[in-house]
Amino acid sequence: MNHTIHFKVNGERYDLSVPGHHTLLQVLREQLVLTGTKNGCEAGECGACAVLMNGEPVNSCMVLAAEADGAEIVTIEGLAHDSQLDPLQDAFIEAGAIQCGFCTPGVLVNARALLNRNSDPSEPEIREALVGNLCRCTGYIRIIEAVKMAARAGKEVAG
Amino acid sequence: MRPFDYIIPKDHAEASALLAEGSGAARAFQGGTDLLIRVRGGFIRPERVVDLKSLPGMQEIRLGKDGWLVIGAACTMNQVAIHPLVRERYDLLAQGTASVASYQLRNRATIGGNCCNASPAADTAPPLFCLDTIVELYGPGGVRRLPIADFYVGPGRTALQRGEFLTSIHLPPSPTGAQGVYNKLGRTKVGDIAVMSVAVYAWPAATQSGLTWRIALGAVGPTPLRAPEAETALAADISPAGVVAAAQLAAGASRPIDDIRASAAYRRDMVRVLARRGIEKVLDLTGLRDLSGLGGAA
């Protein structure tokens, strides 16, 4: 049984027909071809599929597409605006926080959510916020550095 | 994932009727963080999932006239963990919910789902056991209420009958001066499932030690467990020796098994350690540790 859903993804409205058992992740990647959001573990452990749903991060592999009816979704493709990178993206490049890159979209989305709710997180707060994002390359140190850099950059802009 | 229909029922009666149809053909759905994993793994094969979270009250936290806090079963872990009334009056539960998995998972995982999944390792369970929680169920026979300890029947098994679902979690008014501590052992500092866990809760009362106690244990039995002998012992004696003895009694109340995450012997001994730490921390928080005979020497 298919469901018709109306939702916004990265500011654009979509009306889609989705099977009841398809996840938000599947629909983003396969129907909208927004393949920046990655399919990792499909068990809510790795965070590669993280997107913002109504402003809060969720693992899109654990959300049924039908549940996203009426929601506003932001994926990694929606972080940059008019080819202007999010300060977090600049910081990740600057800090060398990306190696293979598979985890990066989920980390960036989740880190953006962290900075939205806490503009000046401590290192333990950053580590705790990103505990659901597995990275097998970087050892996390540069990711944490990058989040700190972006927070500092945000403060300078605000200050 | 094996196909299923996704249904949003229009009211409680329809939800109950949908869940009652066919044996195991329909599954209650809230955050999906357990259900979808089990469908993917082929452990369950529902034809329908019935999304309960839009039913009235399911996502609300409200203070009843009688002073009880009513938490809708579909409230997310984050919603519970940051709620001002939960933090102010039931911090023990805030600690339990905040310790579940990751931030983004806690945006989906619900407190009711955690109960209905009935894992002995459920992080909300030891706090809910300490808080003398009552759960409210809706089903073909109407509404009924149960103490949380009667809701947990066995590993993965609850008291829910066919067509019944959990609607809300009711916390009695918290006693003045109550303090609680949830200690959880995982392979990592945060984010992991509990290898075992201990919740300790106490409030000022006319007992010999000046406090009434609740101690509940996670992942050391077929269901979460209370440790009544340890509670009674602490009501009488909170001296350093009394604390050590009570922690031992708590370990004695556990009925752990050997499994992939730890041995039974290790779990039992960690109950002793986390119970002692929890009791000491609660004594600190209640300001009664000085009366325990430690004085300034500790």
Image (cartoon, helix red, strand yellow):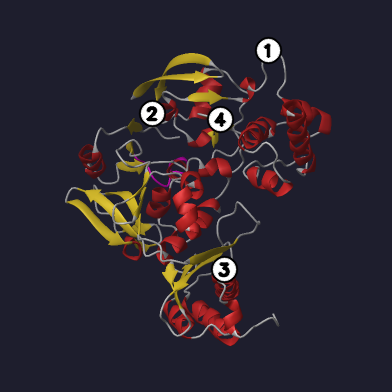
Q: Pinpoint the chain carrying mark 2.
A: A
Image height of B115 relative to B214, above or below: above
Q: Mark 2, mark 4: which one is toward the viewer?
A: 4
Q: Which residue is mark 4?
A: A52
Image height of B200 relative to A49, above or below: below
**Same chain check for tags 2 and 1:** yes
Q: Which residue is mark 2?
A: A20
* Proximity of marks 3 and 2: CB atoms separated by less than 8 Å: no
Q: Give the mark nearest the N terminus, 2 or 4.
A: 2
Q: Which residue is mark 1?
A: A82
Q: Mark 2, mark 1: which one is toward the viewer?
A: 1
Q: Mark 3, mark 2: which one is toward the viewer?
A: 3
Q: Kindly indicate the quadrant of the structure image that contains residue A65.
A: top left
Q: Amino acid at mark 3?
A: Leu
Cα–Cα gap, marks 4 and 3: 38 Å
Q: Is residue B18 left or right of residue B264?
A: left
Q: Kindly indicate the quadrant of the structure image that contains residue B6.
A: top left
> Does the stretch in magenta take in B43?
yes
Q: Pinpoint the chain carrying mark 1.
A: A
Label 2: few (<14), some (14–19) or many (≥20) C-alpha neighbours in 10 Å: many
- Report the magenta residues as a range: B39-47
Q: Kindly indicate the quadrant of the structure image that contains residue B119.
A: bottom left
Question: What element does badge 3 sit on?
Answer: helix
**Same chain check for tags 1 and 3:** no
Label 3: few (<14), some (14–19) or many (≥20) C-alpha neighbours in 10 Å: some
Question: What element does badge 2 sit on?
Answer: loop
Q: Amino acid at mark 1?
A: Asp
Residue at point 58%, 83% (across, down)? B292
**Same chain check for tags 3 and 2:** no
Majority secondary structure in the magenta region: loop
Q: Which residue is mark 3?
A: B285
Label 4: few (<14), some (14–19) or many (≥20) C-alpha neighbours in 10 Å: many
